[in-house]
């Protein structure tokens, strides 16, 4: 298995004036990402609008300081930076975004210009990830996963849900694939060889066009010693946990839900 590189682009901007922001800015961040790509490659942007397909990018909500809290949002402080993070699981998309910033010095959010102050590019080499028996995932933004056969979402990060999901995202977006047979074996392995060893989670509600409920907090996982055998799935699991920092986890990954961090 060749573990391909993934890329994060951090865009630091300053607003020309104070702007009222929604309480959850993930949808706004997704709109910015798609607008950037549409300006460079309309065909690519259209592909990324296709429904019911795992998309090869993710975003975080916008990071900014506020001067005032409203009932439905916050007043952005224009003297401090507003940061957009876009993660790319496809080199073609990453190059398109960089092309945009080579010829554009600002972004538009609502009716305001946000001047680009700096770009930071981060890549990940998965060959450096350790094969750890114990690790944590920190869920920074509301995370929810679909539950087969139910109209309700999955609101607890069971290992046999989280990690096969991440493998599906990998196979949908990355050049090198695990494949269906490996995915089925891996799901069976997670059910037998992994457990939750501790957690501190709570649910949050995001309101907008519809109401979304997701969990935030941390969850610790333990891999059984026997599970670290010849299958190699223990190391795969740690690498998928690191991959989650770029892909996000669960539903609406491209709208800032499921932002996660991996810790040993």
Image (cartoon, rainbow, N blue to C red):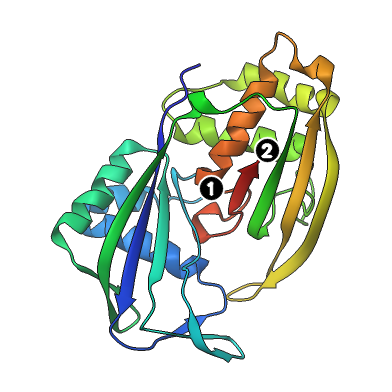
Measured from the top left, where is residue 126 in percent x and y? 50, 28
Pick whichever, 115 or 71, lies toward us: 115
Q: Is residue 188 above or below residue 47?
A: above
Measured from the top left, where is residue 10 in percent x and y? 37, 56
Rendered-image quadrant of the C terminus: top right
Label 1: few (<14), some or many (≥20) within 10 Å?
A: few
Q: Residue visible at 71% across and 43% down?
A: 136
Measured from the top left, where is residue 54 in percent x and y? 51, 43
Q: Is residue 143 above or below residue 31?
A: above
Is disc 1 placed on a helix, strand or loop? loop
Image check: 108 left or right of 226? Answer: left
Q: Residue visible at 78% across and 23% down?
A: 188
Q: Residue visible at 46% across and 68% down?
A: 62
Label 2: few (<14), some or many (≥20) within 10 Å?
A: few
Q: Residue visible at 21% across and 56% down?
A: 100
Image check: 167 left or right of 104? Answer: right
Going by the picture, which residue comes out furthest to the left? Answer: 103
Q: Is residue 84 above or below residue 145?
A: below
Image check: 146 left or right of 97? Answer: right
Going by the picture, which residue comes out furthest to the top? Answer: 230
Q: Give the spatial CA distance, label 1 vs label 2.
A: 33 Å
Measured from the top left, where is residue 220 in percent x and y? 78, 43
Is residue 53 among what the camera can see? no
* Disc assigned to residue 264: 2
Is residue 260 among what the camera can see? yes
Pick whichever, 193 or 137, lies toward us: 137
* Disc assigned to residue 52: 1
Location of residue 223 by image quarter: top right
Pick whichever, 150 or 24, lies toward us: 24
Is disc 2 placed on a helix, strand or loop? loop
Q: Is residue 32 above or below residue 109?
A: above
């Amino acid at each position: 298995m060749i573990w391909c590189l993934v890329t994060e682009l951090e865009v630091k901007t300053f607003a020309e004036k104070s702007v009222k922001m929604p309480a959850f800015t993930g949808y706004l961040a997704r709109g910015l990402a798609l607008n950037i790509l549409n300006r460079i490659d309309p065909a690519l942007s259209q592909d990324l609008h296709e429904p019911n397909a795992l998309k090869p990018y993710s975003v975080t909500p916008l990071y900014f300081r506020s001067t005032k809290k409203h009932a439905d949002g916050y007043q952005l402080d224009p003297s401090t930076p507003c940061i957009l993070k876009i993660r790319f699981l496809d080199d073609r998309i990453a190059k398109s975004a960089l092309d945009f910033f080579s010829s554009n010095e600002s972004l538009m959010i609502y009716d305001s210009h946000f001047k680009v102050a700096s770009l930071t590019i981060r890549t990940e080499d998965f060959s450096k990830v350790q094969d750890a028996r114990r690790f944590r995932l920190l869920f920074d933004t509301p995370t929810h996963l679909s539950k087969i056969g139910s109209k309700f979402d999955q609101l607890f990060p069971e290992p046999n849900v989280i990690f096969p999901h991440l493998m599906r995202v990998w196979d949908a977006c990355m050049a090198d694939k695990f494949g269906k047979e490996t995915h089925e074996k891996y799901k069976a392995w997670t059910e037998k060889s992994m457990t939750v060893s501790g957690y501190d989670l709570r649910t949050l509600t995001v309101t907008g066009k519809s109401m979304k409920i997701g969990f935030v907090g941390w969850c610790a996982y333990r891999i059984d010693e026997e599970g670290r055998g010849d299958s190699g799935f223990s190391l795969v699991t740690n690498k998928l946990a690191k991959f989650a920092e770029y892909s996000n986890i669960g539903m609406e990954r491209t709208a800032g839900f499921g932002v996660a961090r991996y810790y040993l």
